[in-house]
Amino acid sequence: MSKTTRKDIHLTRDPNPVFSFAVHDIAGRKIVKKGEQLTPQLLSEIRRTTPKPKPFIAVCKDVALWKDIHEAIHHPPYKELFRELQKEEELMGIMGETKLSPFVIQVLSYFKELDTYTYWHSLHVFVLTAYMSLQMLSWPQGKNLISVLGPLHDVGKIEVPIEVLRKETPITRDEGRCLRHHALAGAVLLSYYEGSENLSGSLVALDHHERRDGSGYPRGVPPSDFIVEIVALCDIYDALVSPRPYRNRPFDTRTALEVITKMVLEGKFSPEILQFLISLHRSDKPDYREVKFSTTFRGVPPEKNLYGTILEDLNS
Ligand SMILES: [Fe+2]
Ligand SMILES: [Fe+2]
């Protein structure tokens, strides 16, 4: 019996993939039809039809969201990682001043109500990308740019049925396709609701499952920007160390870093992002550029993990 993973199914190298599902706005009106092809022209046409974008809102002005971000920093393992953080005030400043569109805030509250995994995941990736931007990027625009991208990378999951997002048993092939649709859907929705205000947001949504060796989806091409890679790696880290419906426990941080190290060794990510993550896990917080990563793997993955398991393959 061969085990097909979500990655294998979409191993294509197509810069202009076809939409397997339609994309709708939050009122349910169709923006993109099933079978249409993603092209830069399509995205710029969508940007032109954008309903007059509403002003973006600073995160600290949304009381409930701001409270949850403070809470997200104290979830394991982040509480340990950010303990004695010398730049906590600066980090909170960056996150508080980050401006999100009303659309993204609306999607986050939808997840908070219906899919808490995706909600907290979006906030954890926000915290981690904001901290990385603080430490790795020195120019103010860089800080603002990268921190704004964390909370919105998965907005396209609003197009995935909640029962699929919360599924605890193996997914069907069709549900796998639907889950992967979130990358294209996110790029469309951010282009539609944010127009040209946040072009990087749309790019991050589109490319955050791409890998440098072309083994990702939906296009099977290397991520077009280093910033996308940072969000992509923070995305994987949080997906490993946080609770998920399809496995019995999260990965411990050591095993999670080993999984990411293997991906770096396979050429899927740039080593410096891993070096940064490792530095964050060390109590003396060394300069990440000096960090060497071990290639000895002794971590213990969760005993029960259905990630990537396709129902039809189990039954064949
Ligand atoms: Fe995603
Ligand atoms: Fe994600």
Image: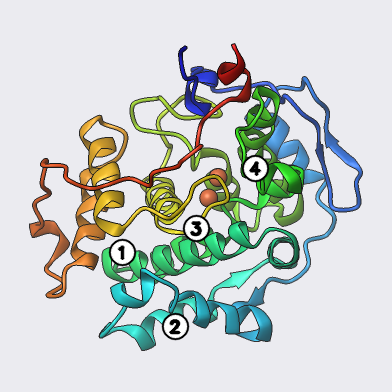
Check disc 2 and give the amino acid type.
Answer: Met
- Classify mark 4: helix, strand or loop: helix
- Displayed quadrant of residue 69: bottom right
Report the disc number at residue 243.
3
Q: Closer to us: mark 1 or mark 3?
A: 3
- Ranked by sequence position, the earlier of labels 2 and 1 is 2
Residue 69 appears left or right of 135: right
Q: Closer to us: mark 2 or mark 1?
A: 2
Q: Are marks 1 and 4 in contact (CB under 8 Å)?
A: no
Q: Nearer the viewer, residue 180 or 96?
A: 180
On whether ligand 1 comes within 8 Å of the CB at mark 4, the answer is: no
How many C-alpha atoms fall within 10 Å of the one at disc 4: few (<14), some, or many (≥20)? many
Residue 122 appears left or right of 249: right
Report the disc number at residue 187.
4
| Residue 240, placed above or below residue 142 | above
On whether ligand 2 comes within 8 Å of the CB at mark 3, the answer is: no
